[in-house]
Amino acid sequence: MPAMRWDLFCHVVDNFGDIGVCWRLAADLAARGEVVRLWVDDPAPLAWMAPGGTRGVEVLHWSSPAPGREPHEIVVEAFGCNPPPGFVERMAAAPAPPVWINLEYLSAQAYVEASHGLPSPLLAGPGRGLTKWFFFPGFTDSSGGLIREFGLLEARAAFERESWLAEHVVRPAADELVVSVFCYDNPALAGLIEVLSQQPTLLLTTPDAAERQVAALVGPARRRGGLRAHAMPWLTQAQFDRLLWSCDINAVRGEDSLVRAIWAGAPLLWQIYPQRDDAHAAKLEAFLDRQLEGAAAPLAAQLRALTRGWNGLGPLPVTLPDRLAWRGQIARWRDRLANRLDLTSSLLRFAAAKR
């Protein structure tokens, strides 16, 4: 397909998940020859997430009022962030109005398949007369898929963890379980550390919430039973992927790191973004239904209980599932997902068809 020009709008709410997804998408579009302007109201995280940027992506500070740029052919608003009114007015006034896409949050719930690709005509406001299209990432062929760059799984298969860990001054002992933790504030972390401390474990903590909580739980010696903790620095997105590739178990949070943990193919433990009145519980159960398809009943029950406990929706089990069976289940799920169209390819086809 001929290259297209994109405006991608990102509002950074918290926790870097929004900008993480948007940068991966922008960079993947550019790697495929597209031209992207990434509008972001807080570009500061990109200094460590993607230092130096990438060819084909121009980062614009989304200020108020927004710079007076003419819209590109495709306008993507991430997670319903709504582009500035003045920009929308220029979209509506363009001789050939751009394709306007609302890139939604990732979910495994049934409404994704029912809503993916639906139009939403605007009948009032600065965008009157335009149509906004809903685009849902997801885990099935009836959704927009997951971000997966060309060559990602091949790079994963060729990866050697020992050399990467050594570059970051991390040297696990031969008998140590290597576990990464990237989480929100989580009371269940104390229970997980207690379980992990019963065996030799090297716990690699990411900056901010995970490091702060683990430091408080293991003390200044950074040891508890058989567990020792090591604080990792801020990592670029590419290096964060390799952290996940290096570990026997990955505890991740939110949307971006969940997808990267799936592609890593190792046992994963997901902390969903918590909402009031446990509104996230249904979303978590739908995700587990997808993750556990084809799993033996005992393993499925163990992983469901573990994930519920990690998310404060039940007691945290005092033992972990068999790692070989756990890894096999995640690897089979990853392989099924890898046979589906990735999100960027799906988005390119959708945008081209709507032009």
Image (cartoon, helix red, strand yellow):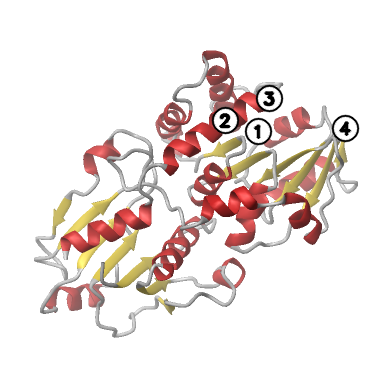
Tell me where residue 339 appears, x and y as whole percent: 40, 42
What residue occupies the far top of the structure in this picture?
298
In the image, what residue occupies the spot 39% across and 78% down? 63
Mark 4 vs 2, N-terminal side: 4
- Disc 1 to disc 2, how far (Cα)? 7 Å
Tell me where residue 66 appears, x and y as whole percent: 33, 80
* Mark 1 vs mark 4: in front: 4
Mark 1 vs 4, N-terminal side: 1
Mark 3 vs 1, N-terminal side: 1
Discs 1, 4 touching: Cβ within 8 Å: no
Tag 4 secondary structure: loop
Tell me where residue 149 appears, x and y as whole percent: 46, 57
Q: What's the amino acid at mark 2?
A: Gly
The answer to whether 11 appears left or right of 101 in the picture is: right
Q: What's the amino acid at mark 3?
A: Leu
Q: Which residue is mark 4?
A: 225
Discs 1, 2 touching: Cβ within 8 Å: yes
Mark 3 vs 4, N-terminal side: 4
Mark 1 vs 2, N-terminal side: 1
In the image, what residue occupies the spot 71% across and 30% down? 191
* Mark 3 vs mark 1: in front: 3
In the image, what residue occupies the spot 87% across and 33% down? 226
Q: Please determine whether, in this image, residue 317 is positioned above or below residue 10.
A: above
Q: Please determine whether, in this image, residue 132 is positioned above or below residue 85.
A: above
Residue 312, disc? 2
Q: Please determine whether, in this image, residue 290 is positioned above or below residue 179.
A: above
Q: What's the amino acid at mark 4?
A: Gly
The answer to whether 348 appears left or right of 292 in the picture is: left
Q: Which residue is mark 3?
A: 320
